[in-house]
Image (spheres, rainbow, N blue to C red):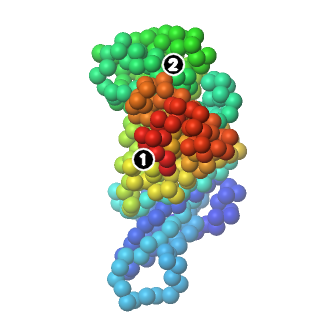
Amino acid sequence: MGARAMLAELARDEDYLLASYALDLPAEVDPWARVSRFAVGQTIGTWVEVPGLTPELRERHEGRVVQVLPIPAADTTNRSTGDPVSYLATIAFPTVNFGASLPQLLNTVIGNDASTSLEAKLVDLQLPGSLESSFAGPRFGVAGLRELTGVADGPLLLNMLKPCTGLPPEVAAQIFEATALGGIDLIKDDELMGNTGYSTVLRRVELFTAAADRAYQTTGVRTIYLPNVSDRPDRMLATARRAVEAGARALMVAYTTVGLGAVEMLADEVGVPILGHFAGAAPLYEGPHTGMSAPLAVGLFPRLAGADLTLLVSPYGGYPITRLQYLRTAHQLSLPRPHLKPTMPVVGGGVHPGTVARFLDELGPDIVLGVGGAIQGHPDGAAAGVRAMRQAADAALAGVDAETYAQDHAELATALELWGTL
């Protein structure tokens, strides 16, 4: 039994999720039959007639093959080679099968029934409006984050506490305050710092909030601390609630390791913005033949789950993400959707004052610049590192090259001399 075909135009007019896959098959394998088998396996789950499998059930619940395109686009048989043939295949999945459940949606589009499994990489999803509107998405989005921070335009600045682990909260609070004295908008935990015996989330919230208040008296900027509450869902929610009660105005969670459904729960319950961290996501997209594409894994899915801001890896910090997939991930986070607020991309990895102009040119001003070593490692201290980043952003927004702007801004000049420009 094979899946029936469906035109994409009809699928878009009805309640179908369009999932596209890249796959390779031996030249002798019938690609339509193979993709059809997968579509059946991921929906009604049987390729033989069984009791209860009525025509009405198949009509309502069976996946439909929309297209199977050869790459390159060969229309004639080439028998001169036995090399595998590449295809782009699209399947229409009835949304009634999974509804507003991200875990079940994932089970459908990348889960594999053992008897019909297909080695393929999910590369694109197109959601009908009825399905997109069933997800709450970011509760705050870009506008809410700007209201929270008081930054009306231009990029927000974020720093992450280092060392990643081992700092007693009292020592970490000193580092926090030294950075906040530069007027930074956001400071987050490293993803490796959780709710530990030597440094609890609640203790950090208490100490860091007091440090932010002291720095505010000097800078007029009330730095927001984002504690990492990633944990087992029940403990995570309890910790998050206590953190918010103690003064936390935003939270951080690793959406892959806790699960997208747990992030949705958190967003529903806590009433503060959530930063989605991509820790654990790389295995989902690094393989060329399985998993899913980076724009889905670290773009669309955390946005659907409710992340108001989320980390975006760039190709300029040493990680081998392609520039195309970096830009497509930013698009999945920020481009307008009819039913979802935008998620603010947090650019991290190798960010320093000499990179700011490029990031603003490529991604626009509605981004967060996530800076580690270029702040703590500034020769004149962390506060000077923050000021250098702010000066670089001001220069880029004014259309002035960083080197020219640095002639009248000592902190920026020092940073450019040390790290150069991109």
Q: Is residue 348 above or below residue 296?
A: above
Q: Secondary structure at mark 1?
A: loop
Q: What crowding class fits label 2: few (fewer than 14 Cα within 10 Å), some (14-19), or many (20 or more)?
A: many
Query: Residue 79, image x and y in percent?
Result: 39, 89
User: Above or below — where is 1 with respect to 333?
Assistant: below
Image location (x, y in percent) of residue 318 = 38, 49
From the viewer's side, name the closer residue of 252 and 339. Answer: 252
Looking at the rendered structure, the kind of residue marked 2 is Leu
Q: Which residue is mark 2?
A: 181
Please give left or right for residue 392 compared with residue 191 in the image.
right
- The quadrant holding residue 93 is bottom right
Q: CA distance from mark 1 to mark 2?
A: 27 Å
Q: Disc number at residue 317? A: 1
The answer to whether any part of residue 210 appears in the image is yes
Type of amino acid at the residue the image marks with label 1? Gly
244 relative to 78 in the view: left or right: right
- Taking the spot 48% from the left edge, 62% from the top edge, the residue there is 21
